[in-house]
């Protein structure tokens, strides 16, 4: 099993009892998977009193915004065919 990073240890010390365990799991694993764990660690260290909601908001800031487009604006290759 992979050893916990400094970020993951600090995160679990502060927010391990958080009732929303699903969100906690993603906030714990996604930063390493998507390459922004060091940024999250720095943020945690500089915001020792941050709420879990503030942490989640900062985590979400690392994702591209979702663009909603009308179906008529999609190329034929972009259309969803209902199968995954």
Image (spheres, helix red, strand yellow):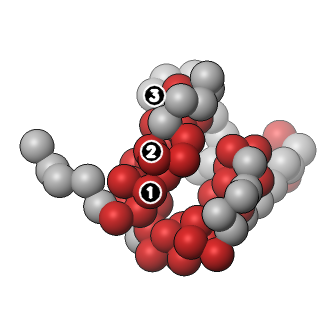
- Residue 81 visible somewhere in the drawing: no
Label 2 Cα crowd, 10 Å radius (few <14 / some 14-19 / many 20+): some
Rounded to the nearest whole Å, what is the CA distance between mark 2 and mark 3? 34 Å
Q: Is the N terminus in the top left, top right, bottom left or bottom right quadrant?
A: top left
Q: Is residue 15 left or right of residue 10?
A: right
The answer to whether residue 11 is seen in the rendering is yes
Callout 3 secondary element: loop
**Mark 3 = which residue?**
84
**The furthest residue to the left:** 1
Contact (Cβ within 8 Å) of mark 2 with mark 3: no
| In-front residue for pair 57/78 | 57
Q: CA distance from mark 2 to mark 1?
A: 5 Å
Numbered circle sitting on residue 23: none
Q: Position of residue 64 (x, y in %)?
A: 68, 64
The front one of 11 and 61 is 11
Q: Earlier in the sequence, mark 2 or mark 3?
A: 2
Q: Which residue is mark 2?
A: 12
- The secondary structure type at the circle numbered 2 is helix
Q: Quadrant of the C terminus?
A: top left
The residue carrying pointer 3 sits among few (fewer than 14), some (14 to 19) or many (20 or more) residues within 10 Å by Cα, namely few
Q: Residue at x 26, y 53 (%)?
A: 4
Instruction: Give the number of the disc on residue 10.
Output: 1
Residue occupying image coordinates x 69% and y 45%? 52
Which secondary structure lies at badge 1? helix
In the rendered structure, are the residues bearing label 2 and label 1 in contact, judged by CB atoms less than 8 Å apart?
yes
């Amino acid at each position: 099993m992979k050893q916990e990073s400094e970020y993951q240890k600090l995160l679990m010390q502060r927010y391990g009892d958080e009732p929303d365990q699903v969100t906690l799991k993603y906030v714990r694993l996604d930063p390493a998977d998507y390459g922004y764990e060091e940024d999250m660690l720095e943020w945690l260290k500089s915001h020792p009193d941050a709420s879990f909601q503030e942490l989640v908001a900062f985590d979400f800031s690392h994702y591209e915004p979702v663009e909603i487009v009308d179906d008529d604006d999609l190329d034929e290759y972009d259309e969803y065919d209902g199968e995954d």
